[in-house]
Amino acid sequence: MFKINENYLKLPGSYLFSTIGKKVAAYSSANPDKSIIRLGIGDVTQPLAPAIIEALHKAVDEMGKKETFHGYAPDLGYEFLRNAIVKGDYESRGADIKADEIFVSDGAKCDSSNIQEIFGSDNKIAVCDPVYPVYVDSNVMAGRTGEYNKETETWSKVIYMPCTKENNFTPELPKETPDMIYLCYPNNPTGSTITKDELQKWVDYANKVGAVIIYDAAYEAYISEDNVPHTIYECEGARTCAIELRSFSKNAGFTGVRLGFTVIPKELKCGEVSLHAMWARRHGTKYNGAPYIVQRAGEAVYSEAGEQQLKEQVAYYMNNAKTIREGLISAGYEAFGGINAPYVWLKTPDKMTSWEFFDYLLEQANIVGTPGSGFGPSGEGYFRLTGFGSHEATVEAMERIKRL
Amino acid sequence: MFKINENYLKLPGSYLFSTIGKKVAAYSSANPDKSIIRLGIGDVTQPLAPAIIEALHKAVDEMGKKETFHGYAPDLGYEFLRNAIVKGDYESRGADIKADEIFVSDGAKCDSSNIQEIFGSDNKIAVCDPVYPVYVDSNVMAGRTGEYNKETETWSKVIYMPCTKENNFTPELPKETPDMIYLCYPNNPTGSTITKDELQKWVDYANKVGAVIIYDAAYEAYISEDNVPHTIYECEGARTCAIELRSFSKNAGFTGVRLGFTVIPKELKCGEVSLHAMWARRHGTKYNGAPYIVQRAGEAVYSEAGEQQLKEQVAYYMNNAKTIREGLISAGYEAFGGINAPYVWLKTPDKMTSWEFFDYLLEQANIVGTPGSGFGPSGEGYFRLTGFGSHEATVEAMERIKRL
């Protein structure tokens, strides 16, 4: 009789968004006259920019003609896209990354969950707390996290690095030495970020202890302040310790288009074994490339018109984030983030739990957000609102909160 | 210090297509006047059908407007596509599959390599020999295959089921009981297929011994004969033992568009644990959906215009396969397949090895094919030609072979 992967059975239920959905549905059905504003979503709402639409149409036309049809894509992705990435994301930041160190994929979620596969099952991971759940869950499935403690909501073999207002949402170097360190800046869910000097400390630490940093820079486009690194390869020594994950979802609205990439520098090795070669083998064996038309759309992101249009799109969401942040502060809340990230992270008032505040906000202001405890134990007592809604709804939501 | 997944180091080099590339390049450069015909490829060459192009343009336009923009897709894929699949691929064959048993993905390669992840690492797999290398390699990476024997080119913990002309390329039930059985019909690389009665024997066997069948039906559209099953769910009892993998790559030319799906019936269980629920958890945690525009293109495959146009496209490739098969036979070769599959599998003449025949065909007829030994030890002495080239080139290739 075949056996299943027992690690899957250890996973606690993934109830955060389904519980939110159920609570909202129940409230709506009991209060059909109330207009609900959803600021809990991490999904974009603005349409694709004209330069992207144009590139997609052009590529579709190419696929309809024998002379310009494209079948299987090259393993690493098309050179036109990888060259555009190098120029737009790395050379422009003074970071030394070559086109053949870039692996084009269908998004950062797949890459961030698959990357652990090239590591041994006895590696110890370190994550921020709160954290994007995919990092931990993918390691649970691979049997790397030990046992789950329902009381503390933590895994016995995971090193948690609390990020709270007390440490300005920047974790300290862990006391126990990890093998794999997941970092995400600008951060989901806290909306915080890290300075170049602080990130340099992590790079130095990883090189010293022989850890690998898996650096998720999906929200890089939202950075507005100086001295905040756009890529970990701005730091010296990152080429020997860091893998970077990038996405087109939030900078170009590709959540429903699907495109991302992973960077693995050729110097990143375990003894003689190159992680670049391992990931290339995985990519070649278990993946078959992002669609040609989508890779052309990705190229358009770096065109002059594309860059201009997407700057406006990001500014639209960041204006929402600013509206939320400033609205909350003027209403007496402690609010964080929203300056270099589309997320605003607020401290719940009057020692309410995250879920108590969820109910309060839904019932008293008809606003939906995301309870911070859903991202990890140190998220308890916090709450996430996002800038991805429409501006009108965002303004209205802040008016309601001020009236509470 | 972080550790790597040591299983990757066990993988022998993947040199088949790179060796072919090098040999062809060397020959071309030494003989610049020769016109080389490539019949080794598994990639399609015809442009996307007009109905697909139209659907893509329409969906691209939707993505450019706020009212019709689509962000993250539903976890299982859009209902419009899953409903079209149920109607077009299952109801029409009398197979009882529901829309919520279908998981839309970006292709059968990803699914066929990822599906092993929900099974325990101590399961024993059985594969046909020769075989599509991804089934074995993905299990090697997961540490399920034991040690590699360079002499026999086999893994100690894999059950190989030889498929040769002696058994009409249909494997016998294995002597040693497997936990997971990979079957691919119509078959790549042998171009053979299986009757419904024969497949029923495998379903009965799997249910009896408690094995799961991973059934790759990527070439289903090429079936031309009656009594050949288009889906394993035409067999009684398949809902309790079989997972089916499907692709849009070969029936609709989507190798560069990327779309596929996996079917897991809800009755398929290990004890109380539903494989459907496990795959749903994996899909939700480690995947983020196929692009909206691509799912709309998939829907168009099942439209009246789409079905008609794709029937013609498949007929074009199958006419090539027929030309190859009949050309080889009239030139005195033993040739197999090419009736229910785009692949023709030939026995090399004069006891030549697969690679000797590769060199012979390249040098004497300037034709590139794929050595059968590249697909497994029982492929030695065989050679694969494909119907995916242009008709003119295919006819010319057969003229050259007849003149040898």
Image: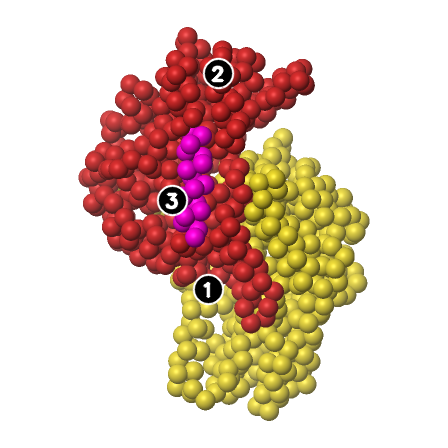
Chain colours: A red, B yellow
Circle 3 SS class: strand
For the record, the magenta segment spans A305-321
Whole-percent x, y for residue B115 in the image: 55, 46
Whole-percent x, y for residue A98 in the image: 31, 57
Who is closer to the viewer here, A235 or A64?
A: A64
Q: Is residue A58 visible?
A: yes
On screen, residue A127 versus residue B169, left or right, reads left
Residue B152 badge: 1
Residue A245 badge: 3
Q: Amino acid at mark 1?
A: Thr
User: What chain does badge 2 belong to?
Assistant: A
On whether residue B368 falls in the magenta region, the answer is no
Q: Amino acid at mark 3?
A: Leu
Quarter of the view holding residue A19: top right
Q: Is residue B378 visible?
A: no
Image vertical order of residue A28 relative to residue B347, above or below: above
Q: Residue furthest bottom?
A: B403
Whole-percent x, y for residue B253 in the image: 62, 62
On whether residue A307 falls in the magenta region, the answer is yes
User: What chain does badge 1 belong to?
Assistant: B
Residue behind mark 2: A401
Circle 2 SS class: helix
